[in-house]
Image (cartoon, rainbow, N blue to C red):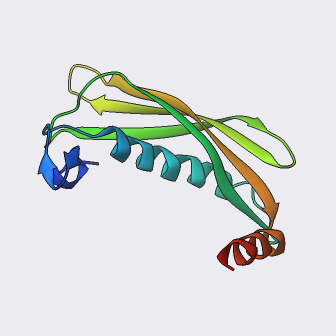
């Protein structure tokens, strides 16, 4: 994806740096890990994020391309752990600009709905 202005770090609507923000990276890493999870869910199951850690290693300027990948490194009956990596796509070779770990819990869909309803009261 191309880094856009809405992906820049901004506080009180003031852009601080014209680069890919850590929170945008976190969002894209969550999406990448979710796509991995979808391959493993059964019809009665749902996943919910429970952990994300990121090391943001280098800036990627607005207008440049970022690629985010997730790879399953652990899959259990109730847990999927992914290693997530963000790359600054460059003609001279892609550069790692972020890496981390994302954990999702796998629950029966009915149980997750009940948990959300309970917390909504």
> Looking at the picture, does residue 104 appear above or below residue 22?
below
> Looking at the picture, does residue 82 appear above or below residue 77?
above
Q: Quadrant of residue 47?
A: bottom right
Position of 55 with respect to 36 (left or right) is left
Residue positioned 87% across, 48% down in the render: 77
Nearest the camera: 117 or 39?
117
Position of 104 with respect to 2 (left or right) is right
The x and y percentages for residue 79 are 78, 45
Residue positioned 74% across, 51% down in the render: 105
Nearest the camera: 44 or 14?
14
> Looking at the picture, does residue 46 appear above or below residue 103?
below
Residue positioned 73% across, 43% down in the render: 80
Q: Quadrant of the C terminus?
A: bottom right
Specify the farthest residue to the right. Answer: 77
- Residue 3 visible in rendering: no
- Residue 13 visible in rendering: yes
The x and y percentages for residue 117 are 72, 78
The x and y percentages for residue 113 are 74, 75
Position of 78 with respect to 17 (left or right) is right
Q: Count the numbered circles shown.
A: 0
Position of 71 with respect to 1 (left or right) is right
Q: Quadrant of residue 106?
A: bottom right
């Amino acid at each position: 994806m191309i880094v856009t202005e809405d992906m820049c770090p901004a506080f009180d609507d003031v852009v601080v740096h014209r680069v890919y923000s850590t929170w945008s990276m976190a969002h894209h890493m969550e999406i990448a890990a979710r796509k991995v999870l979808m391959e493993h869910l059964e019809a009665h199951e749902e996943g919910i994020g429970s952990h994300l850690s990121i090391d943001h290693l280098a800036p990627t300027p607005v207008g440049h391309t970022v690629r985010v990948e997730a790879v399953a490194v652990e899959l259990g009956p109730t847990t999927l752990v992914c290693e997530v990596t963000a790359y600054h796509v460059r003609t001279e070779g892609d550069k790692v600009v972020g890496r981390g770990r994302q954990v999702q819990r796998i629950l029966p869909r009915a149980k997750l709905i009940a948990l959300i309803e309970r917390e909504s009261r």
